[in-house]
Image (tube, rainbow, N blue to C red):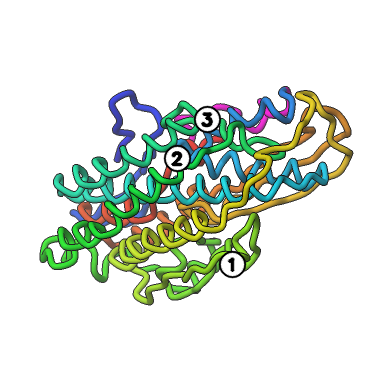
Amino acid sequence: MGPQHPSTHGVLRMVLKMDGERVVDCDPVVGYLHRSIEKMAENRTFTQVIPVTDRLDYCTSMTSNYVYVLAVEKLADLTPPPRAEYIRVIMTELNRIASHLLWYGTFCLEIGATTPFLYSFRDREKVLDLFESACGARLLYNYIRIGGVSQDINQKFLDRMIEFLDYWEPIIPEYEQLLDENPIFYNRTVGVGTVPLAMCRNYGVSGPNVRAAGVAEDVRRDDPFAVYKELEFDIPVEKESDVFARYRVRMRELRESARILRQCYEKIPTGAFGLPLNYRFKVPPGETYVHIESPRGDIGCYLASSGGDMPWRCKFRTPSFVHIQLFKKLLEGVLIPDIMAICASFDIVLPETDR
């Protein structure tokens, strides 16, 4: 099954053994997009690695920038200015909204619904407009930098953000009305692809996919970074751990991201947006591991320095690579149409799988 893509890249191939229309065995095949990102990082300065991290998960480039930059700052013992910390949270939460809207639209396309895709991409474009005004890019941002961010945001940006939230939050129920009471969607998702909690633990499932199994885990609360300690937000959970539960968790997360953004608007301080650093600054010898919450789950960066201006080793822990391992066990016994609903519900992004 697959790879199926207009340019046959960034895709997952699954070798299936079938008994009629039921799956007997599944062997996921990755590697069609391998770009040696982790090896490339060893031949670039710490700053030059940042644009490379954009390509890890191009749906949430801000998060990929962020986890790497935090690792460098921890190793170099750098503390960004308070304003920079708030800007980073604003950007990553906006990116979470953009990512969940992308997932919502493509998830529905996978199971045969076109209208939700049009709704979600209409509103995702408005988030990308905000990113473009902040850093000039709509996909690969290279915005979060070591010691801060590349450019400050002004009051006009913040006002536009609130204007977007005022428009967008009241129409989140429209996304749900298209699906929640739809009997076709209900039959395709409820009770389908159920992941027992023990399996979630054994495979290291994280993010919305483990919260759909009733576990209130979120790095933003459990191991807080930036200014999340100063912000109030809930961790949405569902108990059924099926495709429908994974959908519901993400719908509720959209509202929590909007809640965080409104608090940042009220609390963001004035001051510097970054530290004045030499482009080829050196990082003391040592090693560290940092993890944060991405829209797909727990993303981490192991970074080692030999005392120069380039990483000695840079290793990423990405949630998509972890979640793909589930498919071999999870798809046993399901029908062919259920494969797409189950795989899409995990929000897999192949570029962060093939590193």
Secondary element type, mark 1: helix
The mark found on residue 171 in the picture is none
**Residue type at numbered disc 1:** Arg
The mark that comes first in sequence, 2 or 3, is 3
Label 1 environment density (alpha carbons within 10 Å; few <14, some 14–19, many ≥20):
some
Check if mark 3's residue and mark 1's residue have beta carbons within 8 Å.
no
**Badge 2 density bin: few <14, some 14–19, many ≥20, Cα 10 Å:** some
Inspect the magenta stretch and tell me whether residue 34 lies in it.
yes
How many numbered discs, if any?
Answer: 3
Which residue matches tag 1?
221
The residue lying at 28 percent from left, 53 percent from top is 168
Residue at x-position 19% and y-position 58%? 174
**Left or right, residue 189 beside residue 142:** left
What span is in magenta?
Answer: 29-43
Give the alpha-carbon distance from disc 2 to disc 3, as whole Å: 36 Å
Which element carries disc 2, helix, strand or loop? Answer: helix
According to the picture, the residue beneath numbered tag 2 turns out to be 157
Asked if residue 353 is positioned above or below residue 279 in the image, the reply reads below
- Magenta highlight on residue 101: no
Amino acid under disc 3: His
Q: Mark 1 or mark 2: name the one nearer the start of the chain.
A: 2
Could you tell me how far apart the alpha carbons at marks 1 and 2 are, in whole angstroms?
27 Å
Is the N terminus in the top left, top right, bottom left or bottom right quadrant?
top left
Residue 278, placed above or below residue 87: above
From the viewer's perspective, is 14 left or right of 210? left
